Amino acid sequence: MALVRIVNESKQTELGDQVEMARSFWKRGIGLMFRSGLASGAGLVIDPCSSIHTMWMRFPIDVLYVDKDGTINRADEAMKPWRFGPLFVHGKYVIELPPGTIRTTRTEQGDRIKVHSV
């Protein structure tokens, strides 16, 4: 799986430097299910995607819903396992990160995200 680096260009903060890209049907469908956790700097970009769930997950995640221009449409902190995300967030992709990433990087709705190849 390809790794990328995620940067909040609005705040000049790094959200993750070992973030996986999930673009195939299979990888997007499995996501982070069945994993035991996410290390600091890790995460998952699900592209394309506009809604998620945390079924069969064992840990909470921070979730960013991002539009095609890289603008965050919604930021959810510490989404618990066995939950459904919002259904009608307009976006191109979703970024799943370790809990606390949104808070520590001061990331919020309206910020611009950039995905860099590693």
Image (cartoon, rainbow, N blue to C red):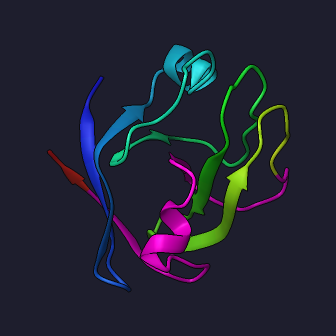
Q: Is residue 55 above or below residue 88?
A: above
In the displayed structure image, the side of residue 18 where residue 56 appears, left or right? right
**Residue drawn at x 61%, y 59% as measured from the top left:** 65
Rendered image quadrant of residue 73: bottom right
**Residue drawn at x 55%, y 19% as measured from the top left:** 35
Question: In what quadrant of the picture does the C terminus appear?
Answer: top left
**Residue drawn at x 28%, y 81% as measured from the top left:** 12
Rendered image quadrant of residue 83: top right
Q: Is residue 10 visible?
A: yes
| x, y percent for residue 86 | 84, 53
**Residue drawn at x 76%, y 60% as measured from the top left:** 89
| x, y percent for residue 26 | 54, 14
Magenta span contains residue 89: yes
What span is colored magenta in the figure?
A: 86-115
| x, y percent for residue 59 | 66, 34
Q: Is residue 71 visible?
A: no
| x, y percent for residue 115 | 30, 57
Count of all numbered marks drawn on residues in the image = 0
